[in-house]
Image (tube, rainbow, N blue to C red):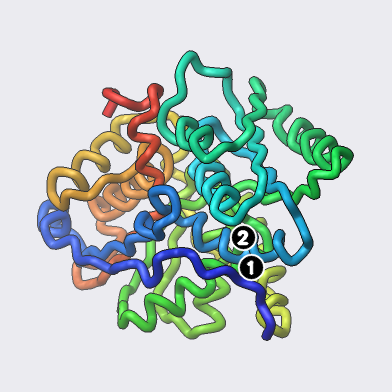
C-alpha cells in the first residue's frame, strides 16, 4: 500500500472527557475528540484531508491550489494555509458579496495570500470554479483542484486513519457524533471503521444536505476511497447513519439550538464550537440526548471538527 502523504497535522489530537456537560444534560458519558487542534491555521478536520491532497498535488507537479466554498469556509482557510506552507499559489472561489472589511476565515484567507474570486449566487459557483481552473491552466499555473470540503477519494483517507488513531488512544465509545456536509469526513470514518475494526456507531448530523443524498454520496465515496487501501469495499446506503432533522434553517443560518449548544459547551467545559458546523452537530446531539436516543450507560464521542474563526465573522459576532 503506497499512499502519498505529507505529515504536518498535530497528531494525535487529544480525547477529553466532558463530565460537567454530561451531568448537566443528564445523559450518556460524553467525550470529545479535539480535531480543532490539528495545528494548521487554527486547526480543523480539513487538515487531515490536506495531508493527502497536498501530497497528491505535489506528486502531480502542481503549482497552484484551487478550491471553493462559502465565504466563511473552514476548508478554504486551511487550504490557503497549506498552500502558503508548501509554496503553492492559491485561488479560492467563495460564495458571497465582497464585504466592506474582512473578518473571520475570510480575513485569514487574505493573510495567507490567497486570491479570492467572489460569486454572488451559489448556483454559479461550480461554473466559476471550473472557469477559474481553466484560466489558471491556460496561464501555465499548473493548478490542482481541491474538491469542496476536501471530499474526494484522496481526501477521505484522512478520516480513515483518524479511526485508527483513536483506537490506538483506547477510545471505547458506543457512538461517534459529528457534523456531515460534503461527506468526506463521514465516508472516511466509515472506511476506517471497516478496515480497522472499530465497533462503535457513526452518526453524522447533517449541516445542509438531505439524509437521502448523504446516504448515497457517503456510501459511494467510501467505496471509491477503499480502492486506495487495497481491494474495493462496497458500502451501501443503508449502512450510512445520518440525521437531517437539524438543518432545515439552511446552511450557516444561526438558530437558537446552535446558540444554546455553543453556550453550553463554553459555560460547562470551557470549549468553543463554531456557529456553522460543530454548533449545529452539537445541537443535534443535545436534542437526541434529551429525547433519550442514547442510553444513559453509553459513551458518546463528539468529533470537534474546528471552525472557531467563524465566531469572529461579522455575520456571527455578537449574535450568539
Which residue extends farthest right?
138
> Dot 1: within a 10 Å radius of its alpha carbon, few (fewer than 14), some, or many (20 or more) residues?
many
Counting from the top left corner in percent of width and height, residue 301 is at: 31, 65
Q: Residue at x 38, y 81 (%)?
A: 167
Foreground residue, 124 or 248? 124
Residue 219 seen: no
Tally the numbered discs.
2
Residue 34 falls in which quadrant of the image? bottom left
What secondary structure is marked by label 2?
helix
Residue indicated by mark 1: 222
Q: Describe residue 286's horizontal placement relative to residue 142 as left or right.
A: left
Q: Residue at x 20, y 66 (%)?
A: 17
* Viewport quadrant of the C terminus: top left
Foreground residue, 229 or 236? 229
Counting from the top left corner in percent of width and height, residue 273 is at: 31, 45
Residue indicated by mark 2: 218
Q: Residue at x 45, y 79 (%)?
A: 164
Q: Describe residue 23's horizontal placement relative to residue 234 as left or right.
A: left
Which residue extends farthest top?
100
Counting from the top left corner in percent of width and height, residue 261 is at: 26, 42
Labelled pair 1, 2 in contact (Cβ < 8 Å)? yes
Counting from the top left corner in percent of width and height, residue 214 is at: 59, 53
What secondary structure is marked by label 1?
helix
Residue 183 seen: yes
Q: Describe residue 253's horizontal placement relative to residue 24 as left or right.
A: right
Amino acid at each position: 500500500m503506497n499512499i502519498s502523504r505529507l505529515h504536518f497535522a498535530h497528531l494525535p489530537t487529544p480525547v477529553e472527557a466532558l463530565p460537567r456537560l454530561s451531568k448537566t444534560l443528564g445523559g450518556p458519558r460524553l467525550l470529545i475528540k479535539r480535531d480543532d487542534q490539528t495545528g494548521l491555521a487554527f486547526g480543523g478536520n480539513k487538515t487531515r484531508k490536506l495531508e493527502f491532497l497536498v501530497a497528491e498535488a505535489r506528486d502531480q507537479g502542481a503549482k497552484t491550489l484551487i478550491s471553493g466554498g462559502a465565504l466563511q469556509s473552514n476548508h478554504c482557510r486551511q487550504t490557503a494555509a497549506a498552500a502558503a506552507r508548501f509554496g503553492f499559489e492559491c485561488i479560492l472561489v467563495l460564495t458571497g458579496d465582497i464585504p466592506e472589511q474582512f473578518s473571520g476565515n475570510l480575513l485569514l484567507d487574505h493573510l495567507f495570500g490567497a486570491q479570492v474570486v467572489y460569486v454572488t449566487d451559489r448556483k454559479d459557483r461550480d461554473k466559476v470554479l471550473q472557469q477559474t481552473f481553466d484560466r489558471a491552466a491556460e496561464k501555465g499555473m499548473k493548478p490542482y483542484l481541491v474538491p469542496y470540503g476536501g471530499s474526494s477519494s484522496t481526501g477521505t483517507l484522512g478520516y480513515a486513519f483518524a479511526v485508527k488513531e483513536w483506537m490506538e488512544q483506547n477510545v471505547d465509545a458506543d457512538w461517534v457524533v459529528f457534523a456531515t456536509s460534503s461527506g468526506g469526513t463521514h465516508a472516511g470514518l466509515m472506511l476506517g471503521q471497516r478496515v480497522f475494526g472499530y465497533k462503535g456507531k457513526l452518526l453524522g448530523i447533517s449541516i445542509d444536505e438531505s439524509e437521502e443524498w448523504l446516504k448515497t454520496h457517503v456510501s459511494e465515496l467510501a467505496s471509491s476511497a477503499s480502492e486506495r487501501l487495497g481491494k474495493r469495499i462496497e458500502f451501501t446506503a443503508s449502512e450510512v447513519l445520518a440525521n437531517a432533522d437539524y438543518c432545515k434553517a439552511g446552511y450557516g443560518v444561526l438558530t437558537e439550538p446552535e446558540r444554546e449548544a455553543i453556550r453550553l459547551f463554553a459555560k460547562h467545559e470551557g470549549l468553543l464550537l463554531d456557529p456553522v458546523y460543530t454548533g449545529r452537530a452539537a445541537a443535534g446531539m443535545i436534542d437526541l440526548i434529551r429525547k433519550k436516543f442514547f442510553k444513559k450507560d453509553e459513551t458518546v464521542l463528539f468529533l470537534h471538527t474546528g471552525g472557531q474563526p467563524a465566531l469572529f465573522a461579522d455575520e456571527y459576532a455578537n449574535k450568539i
